[in-house]
């Protein structure tokens, strides 16, 4: 073997792992050019990393996100054009840390011209502060790169993520105009126990309590709250009490969608559509 051939083999051995790592990184993080929208195809969801060296400034400094560690699943409507104006649905997951766009929701998102974004690493194991920060950052990122109607920015969630969505609406009523909460709810003060049985109360006395509700009056004025549950949901009676003993008597613009066959799961397309119809209904 010639000296030149040996040199080439050694060089390849040193370079190849680096090239492989770079290839994997680009595959996992295709949004690599700051200042431009992510390389999304209309109607096709994609999980991307965040290229902004500085994430949008959040209203409070209690939580600071690092752009290099944040990823988001984004889906544009099937007929998306850069010249049109859209709304946003930010989704906060429940038990799982990774969340894509629910396939059953896509026709509704397309029809109503809504961009979907789900921050990753926003599941129940994460702290409330980080989940809230990721929700708000998601909305701000989409506003930065697309034409958005500020009156059509909504936060949705499932289970623990639904509770975070409601909490975020109380903390940031200047941003959110509606919530879509599947199998999870809280109120900013105690509510009467009516539907919750003694047996259920022994298992869990948690009626919820929003940690930061200083802006409850603004939330009451600006946000429309939708709760979706059914008799098979183990949080069913809690959500009914929170709705009937909190949101309704306090005069919040709220709707409870009671789905007969629903268990503790994400709402279906029909309920999702009903929620959006209520939120977007003209006053």
Image: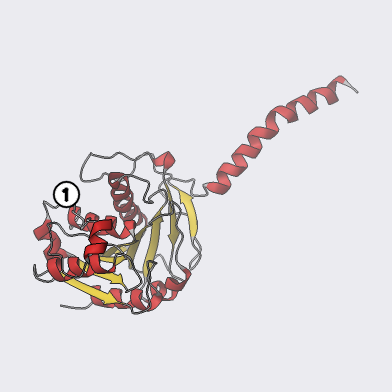
Q: Residue at image x 39%, y 43%?
A: 52
Q: Position of residue 51 (x, y in %)?
A: 43, 44
Quadrant in which residue 241 is drawn: bottom left
Quadrant in which residue 281 is drawn: bottom left
Residue 185 visible in this rendered orientation of the protein: no
Instruction: State the count of labels.
Output: 1
Give the position of the N terminus as an image quadrant: top right
Q: Secondary structure at mark 1?
A: loop
Q: Position of residue 267 (x, y in %)?
A: 37, 71
Q: Residues within 10 Å of mark 1 (few under 14, many from 20)?
A: few
In the image, 139 versus 266, the foreground residue is: 266
Q: Residue at image x 29%, y 52%?
A: 136
- In the image, residue 234 above or below residue 23: below
Q: Position of residue 80 (x, y in %)?
A: 43, 69
- In the image, residue 38 above or below residue 130: below
In the image, 51 versus 225, the foreground residue is: 225
User: In the rendered view, does 17 fall on the left or right side of 37?
Assistant: right
The residue sitting at the right extreme is 1
User: In the rendered view, does 72 fall on the left or right side of 88?
Assistant: right
In the image, 234 versus 87, the foreground residue is: 234
User: In the rendered view, does 70 fall on the left or right side of 85?
Assistant: right
Residue 164 visible in this rendered orientation of the protein: yes
Give the position of the C terminus as an image quadrant: bottom left
The residue sitting at the top extreme is 3
Q: Position of residue 252 (x, y in %)?
A: 13, 68
User: In the rendered view, does 219 fall on the left or right side of 128?
Assistant: left
Identify the colour scheme used.
secondary structure
Residue designated by label 1: 212
């Amino acid at each position: 073997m010639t000296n030149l051939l040996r040199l080439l083999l050694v060089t390849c051995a040193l370079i190849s792992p680096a090239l492989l790592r770079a290839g994997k990184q680009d595959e996992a993080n295709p949004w690599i050019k700051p200042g431009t929208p992510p390389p999304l195809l209309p109607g096709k969801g994609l999980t991307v990393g965040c290229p902004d060296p500085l994430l949008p400034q959040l209203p409070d400094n209690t939580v600071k996100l690092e752009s290099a560690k944040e990823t988001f699943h984004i889906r544009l409507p099937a007929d998306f054009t850069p010249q049109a104006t859209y709304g946003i649905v930010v989704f906060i997951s429940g038990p799982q840390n990774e969340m894509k766009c629910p396939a059953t929701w896509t026709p509704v998102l397309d029809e109503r011209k809504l961009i979907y974004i789900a921050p990753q690493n926003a599941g129940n194991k994460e702290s409330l502060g980080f989940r809230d920060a990721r929700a708000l950052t998601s909305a701000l990122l989409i506003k930065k790169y697309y034409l958005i109607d500020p009156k059509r920015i909504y936060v949705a969630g499932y289970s623990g993520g639904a509770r975070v969505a409601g909490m975020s609406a109380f903390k940031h009523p200047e941003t959110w105009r509606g919530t879509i909460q599947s199998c999870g709810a809280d109120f900013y003060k105690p509510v009467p126990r009516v539907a919750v049985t003694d047996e259920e109360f022994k298992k869990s006395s948690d009626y919820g309590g929003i940690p930061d509700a200083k802006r409850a009056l603004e939330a009451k004025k600006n946000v429309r709250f939708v709760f979706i549950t059914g008799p098979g949901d183990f949080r069913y009676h809690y959500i009914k009490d929170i709705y009937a003993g909190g949101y309704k008597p306090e005069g919040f613009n709220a709707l409870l969608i009671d789905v007969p066959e629903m268990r503790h799961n994400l709402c279906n397309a029909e309920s999702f559509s009903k929620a959006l119809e209520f939120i977007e209904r003209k006053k």
